Amino acid sequence: MLFERTAISRQPETLIHRELAQLRETDRVTPDLVFRDPYFLDFLGLADAFSERDLEAAILRDIERFLLELGTDFAFLARQKRMTIGGQDYYLDLLFYHRGLARLVAIELKLGRFEASYKGQMELYLRWLDKYERRTESENAPIGLILCSEKNEEQVELLQLNEGQIRVAEYLTALPAVLEAKLHDAVIRARQRIEAVADESSGD
């Protein structure tokens, strides 16, 4: 299921092959290969009702497993990163650095559905990080991940997210029924790919 959860799995087949070929040739990863959707956070053991601070505290208590769920090459930098902008303090939930992407990764945790205003908030944070926290010219511009319990694909598409420097993904704190459905979908897609390859081979 790991590939099915990456952003690249939702791209057209030609783009998938191009990015994977680039990875093999140059060993350079792209954000679409790094970020997933959804993230499975069942290991945090959260109760049915919890706050954003509870979620954040649980992640930090189990930071090693959270990093494994994020993927390889992530390094934890800060919690509640303080940013003073125009005399007002703002606090970013979690700040990471990704070695393969060579950039800072800002993560905002949201309890409910994704809202359009979250994009402006994250853009502000990314611009501040770009101005004050980039250490070298070789370091790429920061990228943001908004983790929420639910998102609307049309809203994300209209805001042109998942194309620029901001990604939106869902997190799941309980798996059984959702995981079963996703596994079923993954098996169907895998069978379709195998059948398509077999059809191409038989046509040659």
Image (tube, grey):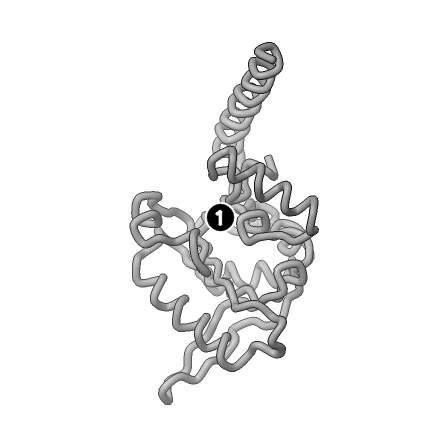
- The answer to which of 87 and 62 lies nearer the viewer is 87
The residue under the point 62% across, 41% down is: 20
> Residue 135, located in which quarter of the rendered image?
bottom right
Residue 78 drawn above or below residue 72: below
Residue occupying image coordinates x 50% and y 75%: 129
Residue type at tag 1: Tyr
Q: Give the left or right position of residue 172, taking residue 98 as reference.
A: left
Q: Is residue 162 above or below residue 77?
A: above
Q: Position of residue 36 (x, y in %)?
A: 54, 47
Q: Position of residue 35 (x, y in %)?
A: 55, 50
At x 34%, y 66%, the residue is: 120
- Residue at image x 30%, y 44%? 154
Residue 113 on image: x %, y %:
35, 51
Q: Residue 59: percent from the left, percent from the top?
A: 58, 59
Left or right, 43 with respect to 144, comes to right
Residue lying farthest bottom? 87
Relative height, residue 179 to residue 104 (above, below)? above
Which residue has dot 1 on it?
171
Number of other residues with Cα within 10 Å of mark 1, as a class: few under 14, some 14 to 19, many 20 or more: many
Q: Secondary structure at mark 1?
A: strand
The foreground one among 42 and 20 is 20
Q: Looking at the image, which residue sits at the far top? A: 202
The C terminus - image quarter? top right
